[in-house]
Image (cartoon, rainbow, N blue to C red):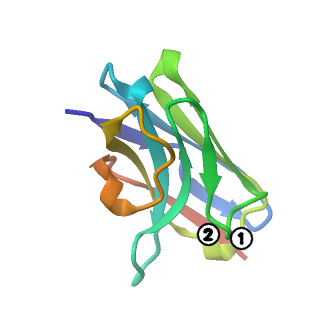
Amino acid sequence: QVQLVESGGGLVQAGGSLRLSCAASERTFSSRAMGWFRQAPGKEREFVATISWVGSIYYADSVKGRFTISRDSAKNSVYLQMNSLKPEDTAVYYCAATIRLHGGVAVNLGEYNYWGQGTQVTVSS
């Protein structure tokens, strides 16, 4: 069982930056693709970014050029650096891990079996 714990959310003004962290408690973390998703009030959960176990990366168009996903296998952690934040980035952000080992990037919710509790990001205008 993979347990994921996010941190780093908060309130920031438009144009500001935040760095989200996600710590995994399972030794096969380094073999799984990891992803960040977000869910705004009244909206469905949507894909933000993913990184494969070998470091391949894919972003949603809405965050490309502003957000950077990275991972540190030695620390069993994945990060999301968010720059040039906009009010429309306001959401609960979730870290997720795929059930599949040694797979590629994963952009669909159905590919992820393990989810963190979420961390709130609020961007004021």
Q: Is residue 100 above or below residue 23?
A: below
Quadrant the N terminus occupies: top left
Q: Nearer the viewer, residue 113 or 121?
A: 113
Check disc 2 and report the residue beneath it. Answer: 89
Residue at 80 percent of width and 63 percent of height: 15
Residue at 52%, 38% in the rendered image: 52
Instruction: Name the residue rendered at 35%, 44% in the picture.
Output: 98
Q: Is residue 88 left or right of residue 76?
A: right
Other-residue count near label 2 (Cα within 10 Å), few / some / many at <14 / 14–19 / ≥20: many
Q: Residue at x 61, y 39 (%)?
A: 56
Q: Residue 5: image x %, image y %?
A: 37, 39
- Badge 1 element: loop
Single out the residue that lies furthest toward the left: 1
Q: Secondary structure at mark 2?
A: helix
Name the amino acid type tagged 1.
Answer: Lys
Query: Amino acid type of disc 2?
Result: Asp
Residue under label 1: 86
- Establish if 54 lies above or below 87: above
